[in-house]
Amino acid sequence: MNEIYKKHKYWIGLAYSFGIIDFPEDAVQDAYLKIYGKENINESYFYFTLHSICMNMHNKRKLETIPFYDNLDAEDIEPSTTTDITDVLFTLDNWTWDEKLFYLKYIEEELSLRKFAKKYHYDYNWVYRTLKELKDRLKQIKD
């Protein structure tokens, strides 16, 4: 058990690499509390425990930072002048709810990709790929 505590800085770095940018120390502390009192804990078990705590924290923050939109209005979307708004709304109705929320939140914030990713604790590459895919779907309407 002492071997796990001796690698405290390593575990903090690992939590940071799992996406807990703000408070990786809290994730490691939660993992320590989870294994407290258990016997025969090795580094692999602690790694798994820390990973699951980090993923839970990450998912919880994602849900807290994106508001829920009950219904979509034409004012929420900025289509090009050549595209009919009903086509855009129909396309958005075929998207999953998280794709709608993500795209509308990105339009609403009017931030760069990097600032948007940093503000909502997303990976920059994931934001880039997701927005590219969603915009490609909207371009298919124009064609």
Image (tube, rainbow, N blue to C red):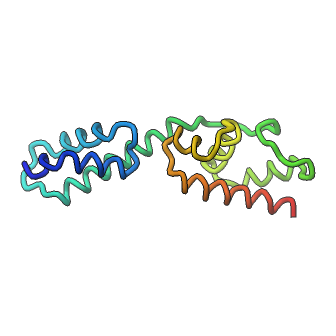
Residue placed at 80% from the left, 52% from the top?
90
- Toward the viewer: 128 or 90? 128
Q: Quadrant of the C terminus?
A: bottom right
For residue 27, say whether it is visible.
yes
- Residue 59: image quadrant is top left
Residue placed at 53% from the left, 38% from the top?
119
**Residue 46: % across, % down:** 20, 53
For residue 70, say whether it is visible.
no
Using residue 18 as the reference point, say whether residue 64 is left or right of it. right
- Toward the viewer: 121 or 61? 121
Using residue 34 as the reference point, say whether residue 142 is left or right of it. right
Vertical relation: 61 (above or below) 41: above
**Residue 68: % across, % down:** 61, 36
**Residue 114: % across, % down:** 57, 46
Residue placed at 38% from the left, 42% from the top?
57
Vertical relation: 20 (above or below) 42: above
